[in-house]
Amino acid sequence: MENFWENEFVQTAGNYSVVILCLVLFLSIFELVTKYRNWEEIKKGNLAVAMATGGKIFGIANIFRHSISHNDTILTTIGWGVFGFVLLLIGYFIYEFLTPKFRIDEEIENDNRAVGFISLVISVGLSYVIGAGIS
């Protein structure tokens, strides 16, 4: 049975499953901290929300990419992934704080695509910085 858990296919399927579950959990947390409802806005065709949400998804996946490639156990991978997500979430709050002239959530909800794009780039960019720290 020990050889079963060491099989690369089994490890890949395990990592994949864990990342999907974490992604759903982390997106739910983002849903709680934003003033708009991501999936309702996306369903309405709000491109700014789609870009911001896509950036979050990419950011979380990129953090886990680094976590998986630099850790041996699934628990360590999850630990670094959670830590990276917390840093990404802090980055979201810093972004909101550093733009006092307008509310990021309101602009994204109103389909301000420039703000949605910047949100995407910030999430992706921070995920690379966080990933480099994990490495």
Image (tube, rainbow, N blue to C red):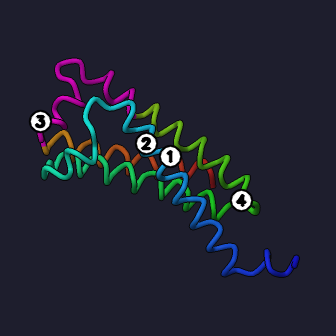
Is 22 placed above or below 94 here? below
Marked residue nearer the N-terminal end (3 or 4): 4
In the depicted view, which residue is nearer to us: 54 or 134?
A: 54
- Amino acid of disc 3: Asn
Please indicate whether residue 23 sits to the left or right of residue 14 in the image. Answer: left
Sequence-first disc among 3 and 2: 2
Q: What is the three-letter code of the residue carrying label 4?
A: Ile
What residue is drawn where x is 43% and y is 42%? 28
The dot on residue 28 is 2
Of the 4 image quadrants, the one containing the N terminus is bottom right
Q: Circle 1 is placed at which residue position?
A: 25
Mark 4 crowdedness (10 Å alpha carbons): few <14, some 14-19, many ≥20: some
What label sits on residue 74 in the rendered view? 4
The quarter holding residue 21 reads bottom right
**Circles 1 and 2 in contact, beta carbons < 8 Å:** yes
Q: Earlier in the sequence, mark 3 or mark 1?
A: 1
Q: Marks 3 and 2, Cα distance to the nearest angstrom?
A: 21 Å
Which of the marked residues, 2 or 4, is nearer the chain's N terminus? 2
Residue identifier under label 3: 110
Nearer the observer: mark 1 or 4; the answer is 1
C-alpha distance separating marks 3 and 1: 25 Å
Residue 31 figure quarter: top left
Q: CA distance from mark 3 to mark 4?
A: 40 Å
Task: Find the magenta span and give its range.
Answer: 92-112
Q: Position of residue 90 (x, y in %)?
A: 46, 31
